[in-house]
Image (cartoon, grey):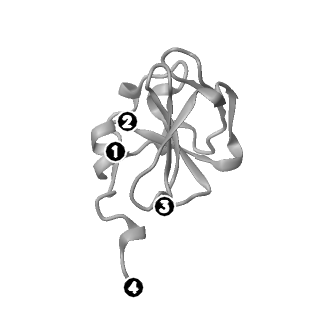
Amino acid sequence: MRASCHCGAVVLEIDPPEGLASARRCDCSFCRRRGAAAITVPVGRLRVIRGADNLTLYQWGTKTARHYFCKTCGIYTHHRRRSDPNEYGVNLGTIEGGNPRDHEPVPWSDGVNHPCDRKG
């Protein structure tokens, strides 16, 4: 399966074990603003096949999560998860031939009360 940014400078090849069924939205401070649903892809099942040099990285807080965007068009393509660094979240809207609308309602995950922030 392929995913790409809007301008086509960045192309990913992904093999999500659950297909698009793993799509979720998050309500953390960043994801609320970004608004994109993401599917789960294990680290070994994502390859940047074009445009690795055109990706820019955004991090904040603990700097564990790594959010990638195309430098040209600004589209969020994927991120390495804070909750599980062995997984990527891939923007459902970047999947070629797909439309996020076809997967509504997309469930929400609680990013406000992130498991990594819980004490004890």
Local crowd size for mark 1, using a 10 Å CA cut-off: few (<14), some (14–19), many (≥20): some
Q: Indicate the position of residue 47 as horizontal and vertical percent values.
A: 69, 36
Look at label 4 and name its amino acid: Gly
Q: Indicate the position of residue 21 as horizontal and vertical percent values.
A: 49, 41
**Label 2: element kind:** loop
Residue holding disc 3: 83
Q: Nearer the viewer, residue 62 or 97?
A: 62
Q: Quadrant of residue 31?
A: top left
Which mark, by number, is residue 105? none
**Label 4: element kind:** loop
* Residue at x 43%, y 22% (from the top left corner): 99
Q: Earlier in the sequence, mark 3 or mark 4?
A: 3
Residue holding disc 1: 31
Distance from disc 4 to disc 2, alpha carbons, whole Å, reads: 31 Å
Q: Nearer the viewer, residue 16 or 84?
A: 84
Residue holding disc 2: 36
Which mark, by number, is residue 120? 4
